[in-house]
Image (cartoon, rainbow, N blue to C red):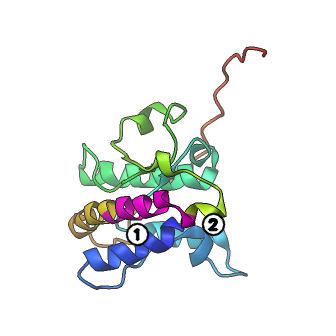
Amino acid sequence: GVEKRLKYWLTQDLGGRKAKIFFDKESIEPGSIWPKRLQEGLKKSRCMVGIWSPEYFRSKWCVSEWRTFQERERILGFNSGGLIIPLRFHDGQWFPHDAQQYQTFDISKYASLLPSFWETTKAYELDQRIGDFSAKLAIKIRNAPEFSSDWPILESEPVPVPTTPLKRF
């Protein structure tokens, strides 16, 4: 999927240095205390790539990673961003207001849950887009500060599902 392709391209864009990417589903071993492991992953990460969709903001741990990196940007004086690099997997209409302020890298037209997607021309286009994204991400990683054991972790609540009146059909 997207993760495998990003890791490949990012390794190339970092000059062949193997990209270390913390993916919650791949980086946490069975039997690990996952909240603790997520916190360690956040502390050691130099940048945050969120695959933003409305569901992303309904997850306590996704919102926590986002708020943690917002706080890190604030501490560092990165007033115009720099550590959060979102991939937009949906149109963004239902993202929280402050998330809508971020420039995202749009991959929404490649959103597909079908396994056969990876056999299509669109999959090739997505791979090229991920390569473009990786080049930009590599610059952000090179400019990000080194690890600090003092980085705070902000546990945050998920953003509530918006309530909008729905018309009956």
Q: Percent x, y for residue 149?
A: 39, 72
User: Which mark sits nearer the N-terminus, 1 or 2?
Assistant: 2
Q: Is 100 displayed left or right of 90 in the figure? A: left
Rendering quarter of residue 54 = top right
Instruction: Quickly name the residue at label 2.
Output: 35
Tag of residue 45: 1
Q: Is residue 127 magenta?
A: yes
Question: In screen coordinates, is 64 left or right of 60?
Answer: left
Q: Is residue 136 above or below residue 53?
A: below
Point 62% across, 50% down: residue: 60
Q: Is residue 155 visible?
A: no
Foreground pick, 89 / 113:
113
- In the rendered view of the protein, which quadrant contains the N terminus? bottom right
In front: 61, or 49? 49
- Coordinates of residue 90 in the picture (x, y in percent): 52, 42
Name the amino acid type tagged 2. Answer: Pro
Identify the image quadrant of residue 58: top right
Placement of 104 over or under 36, stated as above or below: above
Picture coordinates of residue 8, whole percent (x, y): 39, 77
Question: Residue 80: horizontal and vertical position, in percent?
Answer: 25, 43
Q: Helix, strand or loop at disc 1?
A: loop
Callout 2: 10 Å neighbours few (<14), some, many (20+)? few
| Magenta part of the chain | 118-131
- The amino acid beneath tag 1 is Ser
